[in-house]
Image (cartoon, helix red, strand yellow):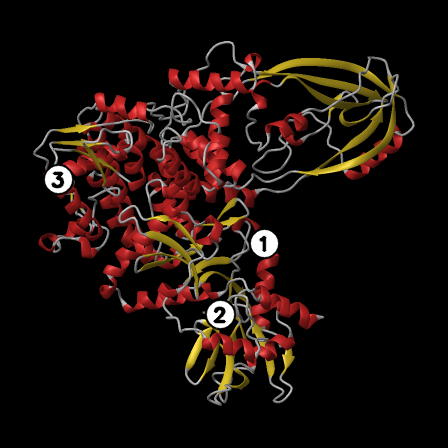
Amino acid sequence: MPKLVIVESPTKARTIRSFLPADYEVQASMGHVRDLPESAADIPEEVKDQEWSRLGVNVHANFEPLYVIPKDKRKVVKELKEALKKADELILATDEDREGESISWHLQQVLQPKVPTRRMVFHEITREAIQEALQNCREVNEQLVRAQETRRILDRLVGYTLSPLLWKKIGPKLSAGRVQSVAVKLLVDRERERRAFKKAFYWDLRAELQSKGAGSATVFPAELVSLGGKRLASGHDFDPSTGQLIAGREVVLLDQAQAESLRERLVGKVWVVSSVEERPSIRKPAPPFTTSTLQQEANRKLRLSAQQTMRIAQKLYEEGYITYMRTDSVHLSEQAIRAARACVEAMYGREYLSPEPRQYTTTTKGAQEAHEAIRPAGSEFRLPSQTPLTGQELALYDLIWKRTVASQMAEARQTHTVVLITVDEAVFRASGKRIDFPGFFRAYVEGSDDPEAALEDQEVHLPLLQVGEQVDCLRLEPVVHETQPPPRYTEASLVKVLEKEGIGRPSTYATILSTIQSRGYVRLMGSALVPTYTAFAVTELLEKYFPNLVNVHFTAEMEQTLDDIASGQAEWLPYLRHFFLGEQGLEGQVKARELEIDPNLARSIHLENLPAKIGIGPYGPYVVVETEAGEVRANLPEDIPPADLTLEHIEELIRRKQEGPKPIAFHPETQEPIYVIPQGPYGPYVQLGEISEENQKPKRVSLPKGLKPEDVTPEIALGLLSLPRTLGEHPKSGKKVQAGIGRFGPYVACDGEFRSLPPDENVLTISLERALELLAQPKKSRSRASAKPLGELGSHPEDGKPVTLHDGPYGLYVKHGKVNASLPKDLSPAAVTLEMALELLAEKEGKGQAKASRPAAAKRAKKAEAAPQKQQSHPTLLEAVSKARA
């Protein structure tokens, strides 16, 4: 009889199968086969009437979880049971972390094997590692399982208890989370710091000097560093949180007039070298990658999101290219060190090897060092150029290879040169740097894509100067500097802080970053994570009523407790009881706060130094100002971050609201005014005429995708208002062929037959011939299911079917089978990852099952929120704008 091996994914199964004897059968569980219910439809009938069933945890019966097999997993479970009937042994080979341990435990509980069962763990998928793991199987670790169960229950209690409160007090579709809410607070706090920051200006002088040494003269820069024996103020002398000079600093602070006066005084004076100092230094290579540092460096160097990095790393691991990618450890095995040192010697020479094998120690708070660092798999590292990998997979493998090999290379040796030049009472400084031996720089420079280029960039050459030598001043200019507010977090810098503070675990960061974006708490400005006004409202509510849950230290202590449960140093049940049912437990707090919290106040936001009321409404953020005529309310544009919102912005928004839209033209036939309305329930539109008793519903036409309100000319507005326009007659039927804009965007129509225009077609300029071509094509369903995908994100872990990305009438969405899920409107197609898609699809599937019970008001709110997403890029229409202006 065969031996049954169960892993999580089909890819992992295919790779492992080739390393096992012929009598081993490998099957995939497609992730978890059991979990807490995600929707009301998942709850068994026998407990649906129990109040605790919506939580999926019976908090009054020792926090017993209600585990169910989701519908889409029943087929998988059935197949596994059938395979187990034919086996004489069961080997559970899921990942070696807590999540993998939990999956193995659930498989045991569901399959109820009557044959011997063993747990097999490994940190890389190579023949050697698999065969060694097969000889060293163990039992399922109950402590790890209990820690993972406790984490899952904690997350469910926080999310399912606080999220409904947010829906009632602020708005629908919001969520709170044990780690997610802390991450959002970090972003909000940074935005508050930026808002409180006040710019300061300081001046110095920059000189262009030339040596008089033998041979060709060398020109080099120098900057003013002291005046009259006092150090000149620099950026380090200003408080990073306020932007102002730190009290008590004994420095010279120049303004523009003083800097210009000093320049005039120094021009023509003698410049003499007063000091030359050389300081040798060494740089050691960075440790091999952990989950967190891989996410950070891939974001900096490869512009990959945390989700993309983990998806690619998962595939590289499952295909046997790298070791396990969820690890806090920087430790390398002896095998890995030998492989890395062999690469160094073969590629760079023995002189580039570190004298002794180098090991690293993890210093991150709460790190778990059960695994190795992330490195190329095997006892010999495959060169990136020798693999069949391409694209992002090759780039990430190359990054991991370089970092691992560099860790065993010699230190880089550098010499820093500092030259002081005195003129009158002023002292200028010139700095140089020479790389004496590049060492590990040859393979890898942290934060740089090209180590060779980085070597050149790091060197700054100065001429050979002697004390007492005179130099010529070719140019002397005053230079102004302004203090900069604390930078907004990027994915890389946020991950770094989360790890440093011990908040969550690196394996969860990708999901957290995806969630806070999909929930509308964050939007991207370039690579910066900008908290939205909704994020401010939610954070302010949690800070006021549930301060512990957004306290960095409290959350880190929770992580430590989970680690203690995993190691057997803490009991899970007393901890859960204290957290949820204790005197200050979450359940009691939520019930008490629900009566205290005023929804109107909860939807209001406090922004420092802004005498106006900011609130969250069904169509987004808005501002309210008291005027002589009463309150005036105006919508806040999404592109003004909270830190950048000024009184001038608000005055302009209120002025526009009070004045109302100004006509951009008048209709040549009716003389009615034509308006461009930048914000409406369904996005911007043009309107013919004013609303009055006689004209209660003036004609309105939505702007096509990508056309901005400010780009609408009178010609374009008239064209849009003339829609639908007749292009001519159909040559066969004689019926009118028309072009217009409807619910699903631009179209052409004839005799009841409609065809949507492709993105590269312009409704204002499409010809009769092109319209006939489109009408002759087979009719496609209006459903999203028929839309041609923009690309395939990967296979769904549960059934192996493709998860695809589409562009629909209301924006981007992802699709799996018959389930579609909309993506955040600020997200670009390149930023969409498989993990993000899977999370949104799972959420949508759960909502779809409970849709019949959803209140009508919630349906209307959902529809109103989805409608503005119709606006997307439309290059040909922008070309039409340019032509019209010309």
**For the residues marked 1 and 3, what is the alpha-carbon distance in whole angstroms?**
62 Å
Instruction: Reply above or below: 300 against 250.
Output: below
Q: Is 271 in front, or is 285?
A: 285
Q: Position of residue 178 (x, y in %)?
A: 32, 41
Q: Are marks 2 and 1 in contact (CB under 8 Å)?
A: no
Disc 1 vs disc 3: which is toward the camera? 3
Split into 4 quadrants, where in the image is the N terminus?
A: top left
Residue with the most extreme top position:
355
> Which residue position holds label 3?
111
Secondary structure at badge 1 equals loop
Q: Amino acid at mark 1?
A: Thr
> Which residue position holds label 1?
646
Split into 4 quadrants, where in the image is the C terminus?
A: bottom right
Residue neighbourhood size for the residue with mark 1, other residues' Cα within 10 Å, grouped as few (<14), some (14–19), many (≥20): some
Q: Position of residue 318 (x, y in %)?
A: 34, 35
Q: Residue at x 37, y 70 (%)?
A: 781
Q: Residue at x 64, y 76 (%)?
A: 714
Q: Which mark is residue 680?
A: 2
Q: Position of residue 35 (x, y in %)?
A: 21, 44
**For the residues marked 2 and 1, what is the alpha-carbon distance in whole angstroms?**
24 Å
Q: Residue at x 57, y 78 (%)?
A: 767
- Point out the tag, 3 or 2, that comes first from the N-terminus: 3
Instruction: Reply above or below: 164 against 155.
Output: below
- Point out the tag, 1 or 3, that comes first from the N-terminus: 3
Disc 2 vs disc 1: which is toward the camera? 2
